[in-house]
Amino acid sequence: MARISRLETHLSAQRTGLIMFDSLNGYLHPRDPAKVKFLEERQILPNMQRLLLGARKVGMTAFYPSGHHAPDGSDTVARLTDTDMDLGSTAAPDAVIRPRFYGDSTDAEVAPELAPAPGDVFIPKHRWNSFFQTDLDLQCRVRGIETIIICGGSTDVGIASTVFAARDLDYGIVVASDACFSARGNNNQFFMERVFPRMSRVMNVDDIVGLMCE
């Protein structure tokens, strides 16, 4: 039988954790002007900041699962795929999918606007799924956290794999629809409308913050 806390409407700081997925400089402060414009038009960083501020006000713990790949590529596996990460051709020799950023770079640091506070938890990860061979599940469970709120990007990559994993680990899930992003076609919309509603609540930042409580 489901625990009642997973069926509660409000998001108690005692039983809910905020997942700041890959909130890194490289993704939120990109060098590509087109990506800068994309993020600014959608107000992704301000929305993430507002969500984090709401969590801070009620004493909710934030978790930062962040790509932390070895610079020498020793923790990366090359594989054949039909497309590269941007759905382009993989015909070129250098089209093998590799991590965007590595653990010793400023790109792999948490964006200063979203910096962890005392009591928050940084989770180094080596794969898309934030729970895979990390201690995120342990860190949540020892705190009595049964529901997660998730934001960040990309929606169709790390957010999706983490949400699927959280569902199979029996967490309640809230996806922040206007604080997640993917620049690949309509992938973000597809997941928000056709995939995530079957395993979570999909809500905007203002509605999520309105449900946060101590």
Image (tube, rainbow, N blue to C red):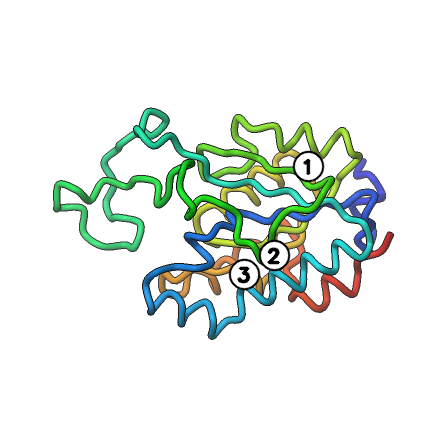
Residues tagged 1 and 3 counted as in contact (Cβ below 8 A): no
- Of residues 62 and 113, which is closer to you in this image? 113
Which label sits on residue 139? none
Is tag 1's residue or tag 2's residue first in the polypeptide sequence? 1
Which label sits on residue 197? 2
122 is higher (above) or lower (below) than 178: above
Residue for point 39% across, 59% down: 30
Residue for point 76% across, 38% down: 145
Element at label 2: helix
Give amino acid for label 1.
Answer: Asp
Which label sits on residue 170? 1
Residue for point 26% across, 48% down: 84
Q: Viewed as shown, does residue 143 lie left or right of 78?
A: right
98 is higher (above) or lower (below) than 75: below
Element at label 1: loop
The residue that label 3 is drawn on is 192
Count every numbered label the image shows and give the total: 3
Instruction: Give the foreground label among 3 and 2.
Output: 3
Give amino acid for label 3.
Answer: Met
